[in-house]
Amino acid sequence: MKVRDIVGKIPYIEARIHDENQEIKGISFDSRKVRPGDIFFALCGANTDGHLYLGEALRKGAILCIGERREALASLEEEHSWILVENGRKTLALLSCLFYGDPSASMRVIGVTGTNGKTTTCFFIHNILEKSGVPCGLLTTVRNFIGPWEFESVNTTEESLRIFAYLDAMRRMGIDHVVMEVSSHGLAIGRVEGVRFDTGVVTNIVPEHLEFHRTFEHYFSSKRKLLEKVEENVAKRYPRGVVVNGDDPHCLRMLENLTVPALTFGLDKKRDIWATRFDFSLRHSRFQVFTPWGNMEVTIPYPGVYNVYNALGAIAVTLFQGISKEVIQEGLVSCRRVPGRWELVEAGQDFVVVVDFAHNWHGLESTLSTVRKFALGRVITVFGCGGERDRNKRPLMGETVARYSDWCIITADNPRGENPVQTAEDALKGVEKVRQEKSLSCEVILDRAEAIEKALSIARKGDVVFLAGKGPERFQVYDGKIVPHSDYWVAKKLLEKRLSKKETV
């Protein structure tokens, strides 16, 4: 691909091109990774501005710079080529799609969005498709699967350059289906521009990430873009369709004025696919599902009504794709564990320890209400609120934890540049509201490892210790530094140490 091949195919405001016959070797948005022959995208991020690194990129051999700030581009020496665009991230996505040969055009792409449940729903769909014999890739918050390879994820929705590189790798391996988790942030800033979605799934919608979106309507409209992208995708051979949680009025509102086929799921008999006759435990859920394709009994290796909803979304998608009920049942019951989602920590102790990613009031409500139903003893919850994120949700998180817990320990959860004392105080407001109504123990321990140690030290037979918020994360983010931390491994080591002490007594 040469420079002339892209100039007429991306929207731009102004360009200065010195040699349109130069061969494009690659694309980079990180000046440290630029190689000779690359295009360098100067992106404006939350922490830095890529325009500050134009010089470094050029010294490393970039042949073309693309950015949003004219003064920075125009200040480059005359021999350097540049293109001024309105939206750098959308342009990066469109150019990445072009560079990798539009891989999603020949693949069946299933996008899953929503406030909670996205990752688990993606894992369910992926496992069902794999059980049916369909080679399928997976791109999610916690893991990316490409054939036999597994990669760590950076964001819920990866930068577009990486998305298209992954899709291209899948295509070259003969993988023609992919399930992709899609965040409101990724949709809003254009990370999935150029991805041709055939199916869109919405799990649920509650206000979230308002530190970025500012209003619920912006958050809502960002999520709805996924369904709009399905509607716009008219050139592919795969049938298009959308699947939404019909018990959620915000999800139903997303269907207004859409022209593509839609399926609803939920617990209400009015839904296209609905569930009843539940049997729950701390390790599984069993229920009956009614569908236009026939009925089935389903077992999943996760507890709680919220996971029933996740399974119903996956059932709707795969039935729509023609997968048999028997394969769907097998795919759900055998689904591999989703890292950091209802992950049990077991070291021979006589109480239950659960690590879960629940990090907003809605997720905490769903998970802790399940814990409360099955806990034989007390519920001890360790949680924190993310720094530099929406402060308005913190008291509500504290109130939710307090309503379902007997003992809550407020700690740090990625404070970033904010003082963790502030995040704890905000959460404490909600806890104090509940303490006026019921007996409740609460303390603040900002060191997360110490908070977990305290929770385990007070736990006794029949209790449930619930470690909320971090899930699969293996670090804590403080101002200017990243500190290794895993709730699972901290708890595991502490439990093993506790058990070894008992054995030596």
Image (cartoon, rainbow, N blue to C red):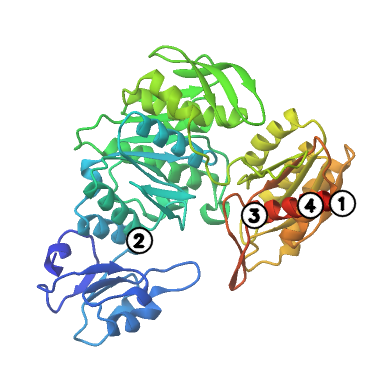
Q: Is residue 366 left or right of residue 220?
A: right
The residue furthest front is: 504
Q: Of 221 and 54, which appears nearest the observer?
A: 54
Q: Residues within 10 Å of mark 1 (few under 14, many from 20)?
A: few
Residue at 51% from the left image edge and 33% from the top image edge:
250
Q: CA distance from mark 3 to mark 4?
A: 14 Å
Q: Which residue is mark 3?
A: 489
Q: Of 391 and 401, which appears nearest the observer?
A: 401
Q: Which residue is mark 4?
A: 498
Q: Which residue is mark 2?
A: 89
| Amino acid identity at mark 1 | Val
| Amino acid identity at mark 4 | Arg
Mark 3 or 1: the one toward you:
1
Q: Earlier in the sequence, mark 2 or mark 3?
A: 2
Residue 74 image offset from top left, x and y in percent: 28, 81
Q: Quadrant of residue 406?
A: top right
Mark 2 or 4: the one toward you:
4
Q: Earlier in the sequence, mark 3 or mark 4?
A: 3
| Amino acid identity at mark 2 | Arg
Q: Earlier in the sequence, mark 4 or mark 1?
A: 4
Q: Which residue is mark 1?
A: 505
Q: Which mark is residue 65?
A: none
Q: CA distance from mark 1 to mark 2?
A: 61 Å
Q: CA distance from mark 3 to mark 1?
A: 25 Å
Classify 251 as above or below 166: above
Q: CA distance from mark 4 to mark 1?
A: 11 Å
